[in-house]
Amino acid sequence: MKNLMRNFLWFFAIFVAIAAIFSLASVPAKPVNQLSLGNLVTEINQDKVASVAVDGNKLEVKYKDDKTAEAIKEPGQALSEVLSDYGVDKGKLANVAISIKDSSETDWWLGVILPFALPALLIGGLLFFMLRGVQGANNKAMMFGQSQAREVSKETGIKTTFADVAGAKEAKEELMEVVEFLKAPKKFTDLGARIPRGVLLLGGPGLGKTLLAKAVAGEAEVPFFSISGSEFVEMFVGVGASRVRDLFKRAKKSSPCILFIDEIDAVGRRRGAGLGGSHDEREQTLNQILVEMDGFEPNVGVIVIAATNRPDVLDPALLRPGRFDRQVILDAPDIADREAILKIHARQKPLAKTANLREIAERTPGFSGADLANVLNEAAILTARQNKLEIESNELFEAIEKVMMGPERKSRIITENEKKITAYHEAGHAIIAHFLPNTDKVHKVSIIARGQAGGYTLKLPSEDKHLHTKLSFIEEIAVLLGGYLTEKKIFGDITTGATSDLRRATQLARRMITDYGMSDNLGPRTFGQQDEMVFLGREIHESRDYSEKLAEQIDGEINALINQGQIKAQKLLDEKHDALEKVVKELLEKETIEREDFEKLMA
């Protein structure tokens, strides 16, 4: 309807413009003197007229003094007869140059036919564009089942290669074999090796799954089709399956090639868990993907690379050999990988000589590649805001804390009493974390509000950890309870500032019992199983595989673990009261204590 109205307005504007042009053309530029035939004969007899031009019934008179005039004669009569009837002097008439203008066909068309033909042409053009728009809508409806995959050819290929991907050594080795399959398949087929049909990239958000897929396309130099899993599913049943068929048809024509499906869990979830049964559009789409990857028709030269961060919800039929033959797992980068990632993202950024990327890597355990890129970007923004030309360590450290906890809120106004409570709270965390042997080292203590926190104690591990002990968890609970216990000891009351700490301590203690089997009384087993229920959205449901009696015992074990951490924390707070007061005094004066200053206070 909008296109129809727009076309109508355009044609109406064109019609008005043409009508205005014709109106202006029909109006004489200058007013012309009109003569009667009697006056014309009188002036000819007075020898004032130089020439007369006959144009149909119109007479264009030109005087000897270059003035002009017009006269109208009767139609069907010759000019000589008209002038004779009015008594013209034939001797004087012989001195007048008489010319006859031939009325051309163009004038006839413009004067007679065009006023009728032009509106008809405009109406016909309007109808043509209207019909073409309807035909275009029909064509779009016919193209509704075609895939919307974006193709990158060899000539305009992706410039990303494995050199642009830091870390993930094992993942790159696995994918390099895919590249070799695409470049020299005969090398493998001569030995009876079968080219893998699919590669599944598994890993958390920001770990580089899409980046690795682009690197494979850049290394292999073959056509690369990319599409998101959500682009298959529409409200009409059968559209997703039609798009899958069209996508694989296009890919087979361009083989060897790579077909990348991002977020495949959007269509690859376990079947039978949603609404609609077998007529569910998502399940229809998944069935078609399964058939295309390993069905009756051979799928030679098309390697499917899919990425997801939810492998637990994928249908088992997708994960069997013959479909996704390989599963490449991407873990969070270790300290060496983080340093390499930082170097890649720092290529186009002017770093100061004092900026140490190794130190930044040490301060960012658990960060993904996307997080590290964000750290450098935030550091560059902070540097620009301070009108500096190089990124220094201070901006990098500030960017780390901003990414982890949010921006500082120095403008937040708090009372002196609240400031004192916050100082004791954070000092309690810091003291317990420093003196317990199995906790991470304190790098910074601050009572400046940042993000949702009124203050914070930044603890960072000295090395990457993959295994954790029961004792280290209990000591972590003690650290979390440090602020709560310090407030209670110093002020004889508690505040809402410990809410997040208490929640995290309870969750950690529950996981120790239900997931890690760290209970001496309940034995080495887990309790409960989380199932994902796909019903009008995402819902986590915990199925209880234990009795009410065991549930009561689990609560008792959780309380016992929290009590163990509380005892450890309370003992340290009693023993290190002087150190606690030193830290509080320093915080009230400077608001922030860095690692070196904190360790001097503790020494």
Image (tube, rainbow, N blue to C red):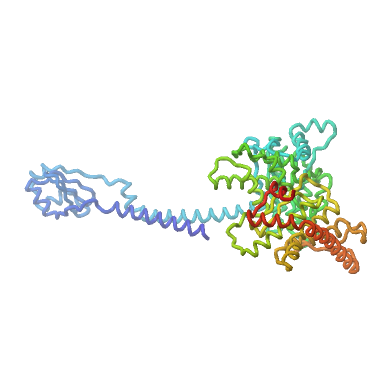
The answer to whether residue 542 is left or right of residue 227 is right
Answer whether residue 251 is visible to the viewer in this image. no
Q: Quadrant of residue 173?
A: top right
Front one among 49 and 283: 283
* Residue 571, above or below 161: below
Furthest residue to the front? Answer: 578
The answer to whether residue 546 is left or right of residue 172 is right
x, y (%) of residue 1?
A: 53, 60
- Residue at x 81% of width, y 43% of height: 325
x, y (%) of residue 381?
A: 58, 47
Furthest residue to the left? Answer: 46
Front one among 60 and 77: 60
- Residue at x 73% of width, y 54% of height: 266
Front one among 470 and 339: 470
The answer to whether residue 138 is left or right of residue 47 is right
Front one among 515 and 538: 515
Q: Quadrant of residue 586?
A: bottom right
- Residue at x 16% of width, y 53% of height: 33
* Labels in figure, total: 0
x, y (%) of residue 353?
A: 62, 36
* Residue 154, above or below 579: above
Answer whether residue 436 is visible to the viewer in this image. yes
